[in-house]
Image: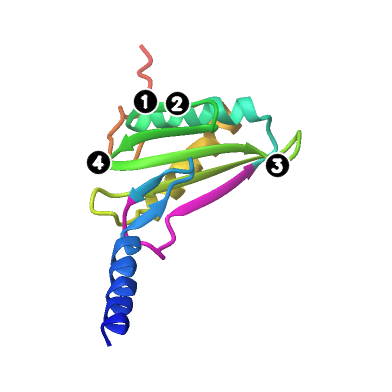
């Protein structure tokens, strides 16, 4: 009887222990709500170094980039109070895949932010410029009529 009770308690304890951990794209474990989609994948027909530079620029522009891990090909930053991980991998010599993962402080996810960052990387690769981040106001670009004298 005691063996069964101990076995049930051990199973319940391990379920509680493992239920609060999620894997990040750089291979580490983080506290968070498991079984929720928190990653967004994008593929670009660009070399790895171009996509790496664009991801680095986008994270630096939108938030605070605080970890660049060249060995794991990953970047880590804080954007809008959320932790963002990006992993850049070569699919083949012409195609590069980037994985964007976003987690909140409470362990939740923000796929909208992951998609927005991926979009900004695409814009950066296509045009060489960065769009204005969501929520920030930029100077007006409306054309003023010319006055002829």
Figure quadrant of residue 138: top left
Observer able to see residue 149: yes
Q: Is residue 90 left or right of residue 65?
A: right
Q: Residue at x 48, y 40 (%)?
A: 26
**Residue 143 vertical placement versus 18 (above, below):** above
Tell me the distance, in whole angstroms, between the alpha carbons under discs 3 and 4.
31 Å
Tell me the distance, in whole angstroms, between the alpha carbons under discs 1 and 2.
47 Å
Residue holding disc 3: 91
Q: Residue farthest to the top?
A: 149
37 in the magenta segment? yes
Q: Are marks 3 and 1 in contact (CB under 8 Å)?
A: no
Q: Are marks 4 and 2 in contact (CB under 8 Å)?
A: no
Identify the mark nearer the N-term, 2 or 3. 2
Observer able to see residue 142: no
Q: Residue at x 35, y 36 (%)?
A: 133
Q: Which residues are magenta?
A: 31-43
Q: Residue at x 39, y 27 (%)?
A: 67
Front of the two marks 3 and 1: 3
Residue holding disc 4: 81
**Count of labels in the image:** 4
Residue holding disc 2: 68
Dot 2: what SS? strand
Q: Is residue 120 left or right of residue 113?
A: right
For this rendering, which residue is in front, 9 or 131? 9
Identify the mark nearer the N-term, 1 or 4. 4
For this rendering, which residue is in front, 72 or 122? 72
């Amino acid at each position: 009887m005691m063996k069964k009770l101990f076995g049930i308690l051990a199973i319940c304890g391990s379920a509680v222990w493992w239920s609060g951990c999620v894997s990040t794209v750089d291979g580490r474990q983080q506290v968070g709500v498991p079984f929720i989609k928190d990653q967004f994948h994008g593929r670009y027909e660009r070399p790895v170094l171009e996509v790496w530079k664009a991801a680095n620029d986008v994270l630096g522009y939108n938030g605070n980039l605080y970890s660049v891990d060249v060995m794991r090909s990953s970047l880590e930053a804080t954007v809008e109070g959320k932790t963002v991980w990006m992993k850049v991998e070569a699919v083949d010599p012409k195609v590069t895949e980037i994985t964007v993962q976003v987690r909140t402080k409470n362990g939740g996810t923000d796929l909208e932010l992951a998609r927005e960052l991926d979009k900004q990387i695409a814009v950066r690769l296509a045009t060489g410029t960065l769009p204005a981040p969501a929520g920030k106001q930029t100077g007006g670009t409306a054309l003023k009529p010319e006055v002829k004298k």
